Image (cartoon, rainbow, N blue to C red):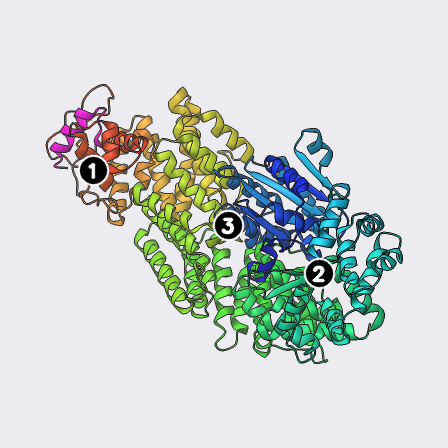
């Protein structure tokens, strides 16, 4: 959708020179700057846009959207609104844009994300929706109502409209949140009419003539403007003023006729011909209407502007214009009345011009307006591969309903394009029938209509791939694998895109069933194929899964290498397209993936840095899963820093933003949140999760619920520790034994390690201390060569105690970024909080200190207090306290003096 935006619709109009000073109205709007909603509602031609542009010209942050009838589509409407807000205050709508552009979040989610982002902004922001009546459909009004109901005080909404919108105006009015400017307010007073007619237009009318004209037009700005144009060079103004009567559209029709009749024939034809255009540009006008009196279109537009012929500039460079809406309506009416047969021809010329300059959406729109559906279908079919590469499925989806079924039936390539657009937007109801129709057309004797021969050659394999995707959505793993194999067998030579897509679907099916090795093979193949075909963002999307699968295997080095390969691919793409300046979509996801690796390595500081980098890029630089993944990762960092409230809030938001993007939900956000509650000792909240999730110790085990069952086992162990209930311990052990066996059989290393450590805790609780130590030693031996510390850091407190009792062994490697080798505490040390531990000099640590923790430890040995240490390290005092708490926990001490002494003993 981003690539299809008409940027001039986001330009705030500049006040035209020679405007009448309407201080009484400007003052109303200035005083209303703190209102929730300003409604400027009046029929066409009352000067709504001119007034708003003039009154808001000095406001520092104005997001302006000039709406049209196509914006009644909610996706298009919110795309313009969010981009306008981003332009006025960068970063204020990144999450909402990410949700919208992926096509997976609901409009309620988009609005909620926008509210959340705006609520933390320190400055006010004004959003102007001009010509709102054109977009006021049910979906749009529902979203705007939601925005108003939860509006942060920083946002002020201004609506310019011809009709009152379907919004809760009475409620806003009752609360004093609505400021209204109506037609009666906008009507020109006699003094304003005199200034406009005699000062701006220098017509030299008598006051009697002004009063008569103001009375006849009832102060209607458009009618006054057209009258002023008609009065130029007239010998008898009073007679002209007396010659027309009435109001409404009749006045406009009459005056428009007067204006048109005063123009030379070629200029009049230019006005009528170009009325089919929503926007006017010199070369475009040339293509549609041809030269006028040997003048190029650019010169004609400049001439029209000088003559004040109701032309509105759309940019600062006077390259793009539009007609005043009222005037455009009249021109189109005249064109239909005088030359109806010319209208399709004019639209066709516009379509050709837009196609030549690469504006596919405008080219298609004018082809439809010309009633040339076949041309529109040709354009869509040819443009589809590049639109898919840019992940602009929303644009393709908007055309699905516009091409008649009988046309699609003759065009199987186009039909497959529409199927892909629907599936990418999570719309599956029509897909099976459409695929049946495509396959029937392939078998038919009648030759199909094909405009993209390369896509025609790929079609059998593409249809099989789409069948595989449909089977996956339906939970049919066997069907997914079978259709994906069929796609690969049907792929033509060199069709790496189909092979990559089918490989990814096979990987997804294997992952869903818990076969991580097969899933990894499929995703590695898909990543390579997508990178080779230039689908960089899709390759990054696959890399996210590669990293996750490598971590589930416990291969941290391979996960890190996958991220490095992906970032190198991003660099290559940036070098190939330096002119765009846009970050490759998916780049932010790669830094979250890197954060996942360093988190498993136990390096919280590096994790926070990677997440900060991803956040700085903005969620618009992320893919479908980025909004929720980033929040989950950051929540765990906040938990490790002791900020449980922030962690809980982030996970709540992540759950709301969750998007599977076809991936199996093997790590549900509610289960992650329950884990935070368990570690914080809030077992009631954790049991609330278990009840809501419907997870019990007696469940039949499936891979898709493995994370939930492991979390339940943690909860049962914590409950036994708190209450001593032996039934809880028994349930935990029985469940963990089953989970451990299933994970070991399938080679899911991460689950094996996690269940092993929980069984260590259970064995120690039951009194088997020696067996628990032996079992823990085997786990440590597994983790040591993998540089894998997170399972030990997240293990229950009993396991932390046992780690300090392990006999001396080969040290664990330091966490990434920590320069000191890891060591192991001796068995003689205890974890009694009130006693300073007696340690042997040189006894090694199990969990090493990070580089920043070492910096803090050294300063703890100085005379600096906490605030001074924070200033020295250029960090906040809470951050120093968090590091200090981690140091105490890792060294097994409970005060500053003991930490310094222990550090000297360990040569830190």
Q: What residue did someone put label 2 on?
A: 310
Residue stretch rendered in magenta on the structure: 888-908
Residue that appears at 40% across and 41% down: 634
Residue 851, placed above or below residue 583? above
Above/below status of 2 relative to 127: below
Residue to which mark 1 is pinned: 855
The residue that label 3 is drawn on is 664
Q: In this view, does 336 lie above or below 423?
A: below
Magenta segment main secondary structure = helix
Q: Is there any visible trace of residue 675 in the rendered image?
A: no
* Residue 495 appearing in the image: yes
Q: Distance between the residues labelled 1 and 3?
A: 42 Å
Left or right side of 193 for 785 = left
Residue 673: % across, % down: 46, 35
Q: With 674 as the anchor, is 473 left or right in this view?
A: right
- Circle on res. 648: none
Which of pointers 1 and 3 indicates the residue nearer the eye?
1
């Amino acid at each position: 959708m981003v690539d299809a935006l008409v940027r001039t619709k986001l330009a705030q109009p500049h006040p035209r020179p020679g405007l009448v000073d309407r201080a009484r109205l400007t003052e109303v709007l200035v005083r209303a700057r703190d209102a929730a909603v300003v409604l400027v509602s009046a029929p066409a031609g009352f000067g709504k846009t001119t007034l708003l542009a003039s009154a808001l010209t000095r406001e520092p942050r104005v997001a302006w959207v000039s709406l049209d009838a196509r914006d009644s589509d909610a996706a298009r409407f919110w795309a313009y609104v969010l981009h306008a807000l981003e332009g006025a205050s960068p970063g204020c709508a990144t999450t909402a844009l990410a949700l919208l552009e992926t096509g997976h979040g609901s409009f309620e989610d988009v609005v909620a994300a926008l509210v959340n982002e705006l609520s933390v902004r320190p400055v006010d922001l004004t959003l102007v929706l001009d010509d709102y009546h054109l977009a006021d459909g049910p979906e749009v009004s529902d979203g705007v109502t939601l925005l108003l109901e939860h509006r942060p005080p920083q946002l002020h909404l201004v609506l310019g409209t011809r009709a009152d919108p379907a919004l809760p105006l009475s409620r806003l009015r009752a609360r004093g949140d609505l400021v209204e400017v109506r037609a009666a307010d906008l009507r020109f007073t006699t003094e304003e009419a005199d200034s406009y007619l005699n000062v701006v237009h220098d017509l030299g009318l008598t006051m009697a003539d002004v009063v008569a004209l103001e009375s006849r037009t009832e102060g209607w700005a458009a009618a006054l403007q057209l009258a002023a144009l008609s009065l130029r060079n007239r010998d008898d103004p009073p007679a002209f003023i007396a010659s027309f009567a009435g109001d409404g559209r009749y006045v406009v029709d009459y005056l428009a006729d007067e204006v048109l009749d005063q123009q030379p024939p070629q200029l009049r034809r230019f006005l009528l011909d170009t009325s089919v255009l929503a926007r006017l540009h010199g070369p475009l006008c040339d293509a549609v209407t041809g030269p006028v009196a040997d003048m190029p279109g650019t010169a004609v537009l400049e001439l029209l502007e000088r003559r004040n012929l109701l032309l509105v500039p759309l940019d600062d460079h006077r390259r793009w214009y539009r007609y005043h809406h009222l005037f455009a309506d009249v021109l189109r009416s005249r064109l239909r009345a005088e030359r109806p047969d010319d209208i399709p021809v004019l639209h066709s010329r516009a379509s050709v011009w837009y196609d030549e300059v690469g504006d596919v959406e405008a080219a298609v729109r004018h082809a439809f307006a010309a009633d040339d559906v076949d041309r529109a279908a040709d354009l869509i079919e040819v443009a589809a591969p590049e639109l898919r590469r840019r992940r602009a499925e929303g644009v393709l989806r908007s055309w699905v309903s516009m091409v008649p079924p009988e046309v699609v039936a003759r065009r199987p390539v186009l039909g497959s394009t529409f199927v892909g657009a629907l599936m990418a937007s999570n719309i599956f109801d029509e897909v099976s029938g459409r695929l049946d129709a495509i396959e029937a057309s392939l078998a038919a004797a009648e030759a199909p209509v094909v405009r993209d021969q390369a896509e025609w050659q790929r079609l059998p394999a593409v249809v099989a791939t789409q069948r595989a995707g449909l089977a996956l959505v339906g939970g049919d793993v066997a069907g997914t694998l079978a259709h994906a194999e069929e796609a690969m067998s049907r792929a033509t030579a060199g069709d790496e895109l189909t092979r990559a897509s089918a490989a990814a679907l096979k990987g997804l099916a294997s992952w869903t069933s818990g076969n991580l090795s097969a899933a990894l093979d499929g995703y590695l193949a898909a990543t390579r194929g997508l990178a080779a075909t230039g689908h960089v963002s899709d390759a990054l999307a696959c890399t996210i899964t590669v990293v996750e699968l490598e971590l589930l295997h416990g291969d941290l080095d391979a996960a890190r290498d996958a991220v490095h390969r992906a970032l190198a691919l991003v660099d290559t793409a940036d070098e190939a397209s330096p002119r765009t300046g846009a970050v490759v979509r998916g780049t932010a996801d790669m830094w979250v993936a890197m954060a996942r690796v360093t988190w498993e390595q136990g390096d919280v500081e590096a994790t926070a840095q990677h997440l900060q980098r991803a956040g700085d890029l903005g969620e618009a630089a992320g893919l479908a899963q980025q909004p929720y993944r980033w929040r989950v990762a950051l929540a765990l960092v906040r938990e490790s820093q002791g900020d449980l409230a922030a962690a809980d809030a982030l996970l709540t938001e992540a759950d709301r933003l969750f998007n599977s993007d076809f991936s199996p939900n093997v790590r549900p956000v509610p289960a992650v949140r329950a884990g935070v509650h368990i570690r914080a000792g809030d077992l009631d909240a954790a049991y609330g999760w278990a009840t809501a999730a419907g997870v019990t110790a007696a469940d039949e085990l499936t891979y898709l619920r493995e994370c939930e069952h492991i979390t339940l086992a943690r909860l049962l162990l914590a409950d036994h520790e708190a209450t001593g209930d032996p039934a809880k311990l028994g349930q935990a052990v029985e469940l963990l034994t089953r989970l451990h066996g299933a994970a070991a059989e399938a080679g899911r290393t991460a689950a094996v390690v996690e269940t092993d450590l929980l069984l260590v805790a259970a064995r120690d609780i039951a009194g088997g201390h020696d067996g628990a130590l032996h079992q823990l030693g085997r786990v440590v031996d597994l983790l040591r060569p993998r540089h894998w510390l997170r399972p030990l850091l997240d293990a229950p407190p009993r396991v932390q105690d046992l780690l300090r009792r392990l006999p001396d062994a080969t040290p664990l490697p330091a966490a990434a970024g920590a320069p000191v080798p890891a060591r192991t505490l001796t068995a003689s040390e205890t974890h009694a909080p009130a006693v300073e531990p007696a340690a042997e000099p040189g006894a090694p640590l199990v969990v090493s200190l990070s580089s920043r923790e070492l910096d803090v430890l050294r300063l703890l040995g100085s005379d600096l207090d906490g605030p001074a240490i924070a200033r020295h390290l250029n960090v906040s005092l809470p951050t120093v306290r968090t590091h200090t708490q981690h140091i105490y926990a890792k060294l097994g001490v409970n005060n500053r003096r003991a930490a310094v002494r222990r550090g000297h003993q360990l040569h830190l």
